[in-house]
Amino acid sequence: MTTTTNNESFNADELEAPKWLNDRFIEEVLSKNENAPELKVLDVQMSPASEKGDHYASVMFRGNATYTTEKGKFSKSLIIKTMPEAEGHKKEMLSESHLFETEIGLYTKVLPKFEQILRDAGDNTRLYVPCIYTSLKPRQVMVFEDLVPQGYEVIRDRESNIEEIKSAFSKLAKWHAVSVHVLHEQPDYLQEFKYGMFDMPTIREDPFVTTGMSKFIAILEDVPELRKYLPFFKNIENDYLDRCGIVLQEYRKNRQPNGYYVLCHGDFHLRNMMFKHNKVDGKLEDVMLIDFQISNICPITIDLIYAIYLFMGVEDRQNNYKELINYYFSEFIATLQKIGFKGELPNSEEFWKQMSQHKYYEIFLLTTFLPLISAFMDKSIDVGDVMQKDEVRMNLYRLDNYIQDAKGVLSRFEKLGYFD
């Protein structure tokens, strides 16, 4: 086995594969998947599966395996996803979480069922890439078919365009619609998926989360035209995380009789999607959603509010978000009708009302997560440093592009009556 090392484009903990991730392990995975006990791995070229900024809540490797079976000699590219083993912030934050149990459940139980419901209704949408191996003990591991040889890629050097946003929203809408149908027909089927962002054991004590508002308030104090918003944000500084938690955990702790609840993706941002464009004319052919580690039942608004900040570019976040989310909602309703949903259909007016009611989640994303977008777009910024170093995070808040973006968002909040 050969491992890529010493490359500044990749996360430090993905430069060298752990000792257990060897030819013997890959041989076990492939022989079980292909039902070929005689399979023999000849070589595996191991390298990081993603670049800096693509993800944080796991460690990922790409294994290009050459092997033989009774049918001949073959090669296959695999993505191996596992928990961090190196001591440090990432391991501490994730070690007691339910991330892998959740994602394994999505790939083995939920998404195959969701796809079959769509198939039965005449819709051939692919919701997930095949997961060919899972394990929780002795270590948490998932192995997938590599989408890159199939023509998919992660968008890293630019913002998403309208066509890509609509394509991803269409797929999300179908997923959400099927989940509503399943919740209506089999209420207990999805109940194990109850661990969202604020259910991670250490999230509420993590400085990345707890210091976001104070850094945002410091910017409001420094920018004269933003000082008018100071009273509102100072007033909520001590309890906005509690209010945000109420939104995120509403289904489990404060279910509303008129609430619209779905199995959400939970981390619906640009780096958790892979797009396939035609190599000749550049036309978009498909988008594949990935990384379902915090999928859970929650208000329908959660993925959509998240998308405004971590999926849409600045122009769409400022001017086109409502049109794009209305597109999502039309696809959501159309899918419910297509799959024969027997409950009462959600209506647009109530949907937008709930979007506004969940403003504290939006405020949390503006004050804590939106600065992180700068780290995603700037390869010189290490996401690990952003998560762990206070001075690095503070610098993100002072970037002109963040301040200008925040001005537009705050103006929209004002028009929506969020500060009343």
Image (spheres, rainbow, N blue to C red):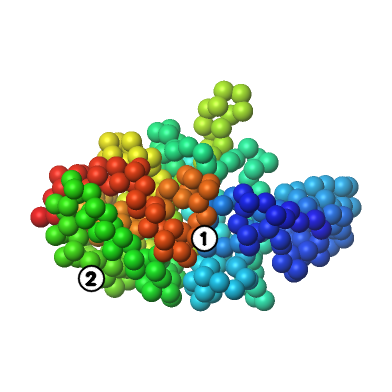
Query: Where is residue 238 drawn, in percent x and y?
Result: 23, 71
The N terminus is located in which quarter?
Answer: bottom right
* Label placed on residue 222: none
**Element under disc 1:** helix
Residue at horizontal 87 percent and vertical 58 percent from the top: 40
Residue 329 seen in render: no
Residue 285 lies left or right of residue 211; in this view the side is right
Q: Position of residue 401 (x, y in %)?
A: 35, 42
Query: The residue under label 2 is which amino acid type?
Result: Asn
For residue 186, above or below residue 181: below
Estimate the x, y position of residue 329 in percent, counting from the top left.
31, 43
Q: Nearer the viewer, residue 340 or 9?
A: 9
**Residue 330's quadrant in the figure?**
top left
Q: Residues within 10 Å of mark 2 (few under 14, many from 20)?
A: few
Front residue (pair 338, 409): 409
- Amino acid type at mark 1: Gly
Task: Measure how far apart labels 1 and 2 are at the Cα level.
Answer: 27 Å
Q: In the rendered image, which residue does mark 2 sit on?
A: 238
Mark 1 burial class by Cα count in 10 Å: few <14, some 14-19, many 20+: some
Residue 42: where, in percent of width, then height?
87, 55
Give the residue displayed 29% in from the left and 62% down from the top.
213
Q: Quadrant of the C terminus?
A: bottom left
Task: Give the mark nearer the N terminus: 1 vs 2.
Answer: 2
In the displayed structure, 151 sits above or below 101; it is above
> Is residue 360 toward the left or the right of residue 56 in the image?
left
Q: Pointer 1: what residue?
A: 384
